[in-house]
Image (cartoon, helix red, strand yellow):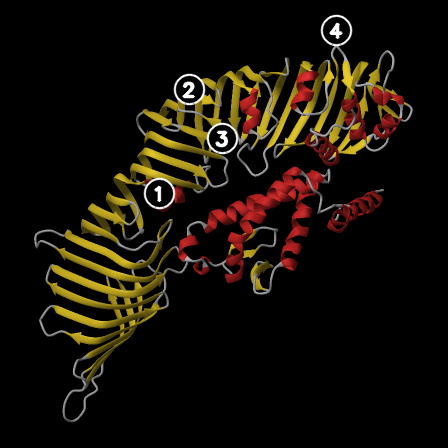
Amino acid sequence: MSFAQQATAISSIQIIVSEVDAPVGQLKNAKFHVDLKGAQPKLILNADLKPMSEKAFAHFDLKCGQFFTEKIGQAQCLNGQFKSKQISAPFSVIFVSYPSEFALDIDFNGANFSDEAGLHAGEKLTGQIKMAAKKPISTDTWAWNGLISWTAGELYWQPFYFGKADNAFEIDGTFKQDIINVQQASLLVNEVGKMQATATINIKTKIVEDVKVNAKDVDFTGLYALFLKPMAEKSAFGNMNVSGKADWQFEIKNLAPTSFELNLHDATIEDKNGKFGFSHINAHIPWDYDEPKQLQLAYESGHLLKIGLRQTNLTAEINRFSLTAPKLDLPVLDGALSLSDVSAVRLGDNWAWHLRMNLVPITLNEFSKALGWPEMKGQISGQIPLVTYANKQLNMDGAMNFNAFNGSISMNDLIIDDPLGVAPRLYADLKMRNLDLGDLTRTFSFGAIEGKLDGVVKDMVLENWKPVQLDASIQTSKGRHLKKISQRAVENITALGGEGTAVALQRTFLRFFKEFNYEKIGLSCKLRQDICEMGGVESTPNGYIIVKGKGIPAVNVNGYTQKVSLRDLLGRVKRITDSNTKVIVN
Amino acid sequence: MKKLITVFSLLIATLLSSNWVSAAANLDVNTPAITAIKNSMQARHNQLNPHYNTGAVGFTADGLVAVRDATAVPLKDRGGINSLVAAENSDRSALYKEIAAGNGHPEWAGEIRSTFAGRWVDKAQSGWYYQNAGTWVKK
């Protein structure tokens, strides 16, 4: 310790302390300098500090532009500046201390701080921290209250980000040997509302052991952005735009969640990738570790993978990590999915579920419109004894039936990998019976063909809803029915195969006929990636027959190209169906 | 005989080495799944780009990305950086798998991944970070 003293009067005091050990931490190389030369005394303190909870010493500089200690037990530091590697804070502080009692009043202005990993950090924070603590002589427990508020700046406290200032946290609590007990905290959070909390924090382990948070009638937008999104980041609900009002409460005891409740009032959620969305949601989503709870969820409308969902009321039981419902009715487009024996279980971060499904008929007209397809007539119906979802894979046992084009299409063994993922993959087999070619060609504006078609599509694989593999064949159904094909349809089918025949047809006498009889029509495609290996009803030495004519005049349409790029083929179909108003042959 | 087997194994090993696979694999193969994944990565690139520029995120030696310095991420993005990186890595792993599958050789995924790891570093702008022998290097 040394005093620098001038001859006439004391102009400055300098204290150098090599090491101080205190229960809260260690201080070393401390240089304490009070400058008495100016009108008001200044204080400078440089030291290395190691709080009890830290491993290494860190250097800091503290300056007080005005430093007062006139009253016993009081210290004031105005125009202060605190600087260390991780903190830079202009501040003023008033400290009042008596035995078993102290009060601290800090104003900070444009303060920056960050821990080493950047998990707790603040930038340009302006606000105040007030704290008062008292310890009755007979006890060893401190009773304290505090206020933290800031009017400017931003704060990140993993995983929560407070982007808007004007937040105020009022806290009452106790402190007894390593344990801070927050008995009552009132948190006013900008863009959310008022929340209440209690907590137990162990300052030795830095672990928040028990927490209870309660928020009534707060803004769902802010609540989601600030508190729910960081916790749902890995789930399907981690990337949404939301609005509405909410009540929220949760409780964590001994580091494990014990209860949770989220009530939504007239809320709207919309996945930012457009995979799903629901509007006017009213929901009561409770959860308790120890007892089963009833979940209620209602929405006025919604959509899932482009398919529209109508007004729905759902109830289900949540029992720890499982959810069950004997029956759930989901109105879809103009029909419904009637689900029964629904059972879901949470395994790690993922859900697995199974259910039975009954399709209350949905008209194909609505369905095709929803998917942006040409409008079709008919309906989809079916009973699926078991649908399961596990490991991001959806499996359907049983058949889904589409009654379309006066015939039927059934879909079997449907599997969808990662339906909500980036590249969903669908596997299925299809069977088609007695499709009315008249309806079909009118729907796709292809040129009239009368007749009926049967078909099979085996081992179909769709990637991101686009076909990459299938073994498909369609041919004229057995039995007696009208089989006529128009001049235009002949031209169009021919055009699908490429240049040649259509032009030839126009130059012959055949152009005087509007329609022809045929014996059979058929086409097959073995698709691997983009290449479709084509076939017809019969093979010829250098190709295959697509339409086999009958009677006089008989027209055969032959295909010569065995391997066609699916992209090119679909391009040609699109050009033909787009030019539906053009009449090629009169 | 034993010597002959050893020579034969060496020959097979040489045939299956990375150069041979890279030469044979078409890295620009296109399937609907690859298109979907590339679109998803393209859409995310605008969010990742500023973090490459600041050095907050860098390229790893195994063809993925990683948070190098969280303190370089603006506070408002700091909470989302881990899931942004996780989503990018999930797409990248899927991409390598799909390119291998698109080549008809799912077992090539590992080789394709390491070829891409080199490509990412080659394509990286100067000032971006990549991992080399376990340490971060500024390009």
Residue under circle 2?
Answer: A328
Q: CA distance from mark 4 to mark 2?
A: 43 Å
Most foreground residue, A101 or A550:
A550
Q: Amino acid at mark 1?
A: Thr
Q: Residue at x 56, y 27 (%)?
A: A369
Residue under circle 3?
Answer: A304
Which of marks 3 and 4 precedes in the sequence?
Answer: 3
Give the side of residue A279 with respect to residue A210, left or right.
Answer: right
Marking on residue A221: 1
Residue under circle 4?
Answer: A479
The chain under label 2 reads A
What is the secondary structure assignment of the residue under circle 2? strand
The chain under label 3 reads A
Toward the top, the furthest residue is: A480
Which of marks 2 and 4 precedes in the sequence?
Answer: 2
Q: Is residue B57 visible?
A: no
User: Residue A353 at x, y = what percent?
Assistant: 47, 25
Image quadrant containing the N terminus of chain A: bottom left
Image quadrant containing the C terminus of chain A: top right
In this view, the mark in front (4 or 1): 4
**How many other residues sit within 10 Å of disc 4, few (<14), some (14-19) or many (≥20)?**
few
User: Residue A34 at x, y = what percent?
Assistant: 21, 80
Q: Residue at x 61, y 20 (%)?
A: A413
Q: Amino acid at mark 3?
A: Leu
* Residue A33 position by quadrant: bottom left
